[in-house]
Amino acid sequence: MAFLMVIYLYGVETTFFRFATKYEDRGRYFDFSITTTIVFATLLTAVLILLAPQITAFLDYAGAEKYVIWLALILALDTLVAVPFANLRLERKAKKFALFKIFNILTNIGLNLFFLLLCPYLQAVNPDSWVGALYDPAFGVGYVFLSNLVASAVTLLFFLPDWVRFKPRFDKNKWAEMMRYASPLVIIGLAGVTNEMLSRALLRHWLPEDFYPGLTSLAVLGIFGACYKLSMLMNLSVQAFRYAYEPFFFSKSKDKDSPEVFAKVMNAFIIFGCLAFMGLSLILPEVAPLVLRRADYLTALHVVPMLLFGGLLLGIYYNLSVWYKLTDRTLYGAYVTIIGAVLTVLLNILLIPMLGYEGSAVATVLVYLAMVLISFVWGQRHYFVPYQVGKGLMYMLVSTSGVAIIYLLEFSTAVKYLIGFGTIGIFLILVLIFEKTKRIA
C-alpha cells in the first residue's frame, strides 16, 4: 500500500502547493489537482481490480481477490481526499485538518475493535444475540479491510462542500507543466518508501544463519521491527512538522526575506529535534517494556537511539528540500532519493552480515546523512539559504555525545539519568547563550 499510495497520489499535494502559490490562483489549481486525482484513482483502481487474480496468484494468496479490490477502493478514496486535506494545510486550518485525520483513525480503530474483539465476545456469550446479523466469524481478516474502507468513505463525506464547489478542469499546457513538476516527486516518494522499509526486508533474507544463536531470521526481524516502532515517535514528529512546513515555505517563497526565515526554521527544528532525541533516548529503557511487553524484544533496544537520530536527519533533509521544490528542480530531489535508495541496499547488504540488525540501524543513519549532505551542497548552489551550520552541528554534537555516553558505557540507572539530564541542561544553556539575541521562527 505504501508504494501504491505514492503512485496514486503522483506528487499532487506538493504540486498543488507549488502552483497554487506560484500563480496565486488557488481555486483553478485546486480543480486541476482534483481532476487529476479522479483520473489517476479511476484508472489505477480499474487496473488493480482487473489484475486482482494475477496479483493474488503472484503473492501466493489465490482466491483472495476481494482483498485486492477493497485495497484498491481504499487507495482511491484516500487519494480523493488528498487535495482537500492539502488545501486545509495551505489555508492553515490545522484544527480542522487534525480533527478529520483523528476521526478517520478513531473510526478505523473503533471498527476493528468492534468486529475483532467485541463481536466475538458477545457471540460467545450469547450465540443468538443481534450480533449474528452483523458479524460472521468466517469473514476474518476481511473486517480489517472493511474498517479501513468505511473510515476512508466517512472521511470523504467531510469534504462534501469542496466537492460541491469543484468544477472539472483540464488545460493541456498547464497539466503538462504540473506533471513535469510532479513526476520526479513520484520517484522521490518511491525511493523514500524504499529507504524506510527495505532495511527490514533485507534483514530477513541477508542475515547469516545462527548469527543470533537460537533465533531464526524471522524472529530477529520481529525483534528489530518491534524496536523500530519505538523510533517512529521521532518520525511522527517529523511528519507533523512536514505537514505544517511545506505549505508555509511555498506561501513565503515570494518574500524577500524568505531564505533568512527558512534558516531560522531549520535552526529551530534542530533545537527541538535534538531535545526530542535526547529525551526519548533517556526514557527509552523505562518506557519500552510498557509498550513492547516482551523481554526478547528489548534485546534490540540499544539500536533505537540510532534510528531516532536517523529520523532527526530525515527531518533536516525535509527542511533542505525547500531548494528543489521552489526552483522547480524536483528532478534533483529524485536524484538524491535514488542515491539514498541505492545506498540503503548496498549498506544493508554489506553491514547486515557483519553487524546484524545493528548494521541496518547504522545504514539508516548513514543513508540519511548522505542525503542531507548531498542536498545541502546542491541546494546552496541553486537556492542559497544562510543556514546556521556551525550552531546546528554544535547542537547535534552535544546531543549525540550525551546519548552515546549513556548507551555505550555501563552506569546505574540513577547515574544515567544524571548524565542525561545534565546533557539536556548543558544543551539548554547553550541554546540560551546563542539564541538570546535572535528570534527563533
Image: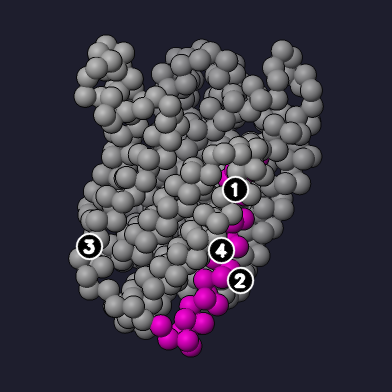
Which amino acid type is shown beneath numbered disc 1? Pro
Q: Is residue 339 visible to the viewer in this orientation of the structure?
A: yes
Pointer 2 or 1: first along the chain? 1
- The quadrant in which the C terminus is found is bottom left
Q: Which mark is residue 331?
A: 2
Pointer 4 or 1: first along the chain? 1
SS of the residue under disc 3: helix
Q: Which residues are magenta?
A: 170-199
Q: Which residue is mark 4?
A: 186
SS of the residue under disc 2: helix
Pointer 4 or 3: first along the chain? 3
Pointer 3 or 1: first along the chain? 1
197 part of magenta stretch: yes
Q: Which mark is residue 160?
A: 3
Nearer the observer: mark 3 or 1; the answer is 1
Nearer the observer: mark 4 or 3; the answer is 3
- Separation (CA) of disc 4 from disc 3: 28 Å
Tell whether label 1 touches label 4 (CB within 8 Å): no
87 part of magenta stretch: no
Tell whether label 1 touches label 2 (CB within 8 Å): no
Nearer the observer: mark 3 or 2; the answer is 3
Pointer 3 or 2: first along the chain? 3
Pointer 4 or 2: first along the chain? 4
SS of the residue under disc 4: helix
Look at 22% across and 62% down and name the residue there.
160
Residue 310 x %, y % = 56, 43
Nearer the observer: mark 2 or 1; the answer is 1
Q: Which residue is mark 1?
A: 53
- Separation (CA) of disc 4 from disc 1: 26 Å
- Separation (CA) of disc 2 from disc 1: 36 Å
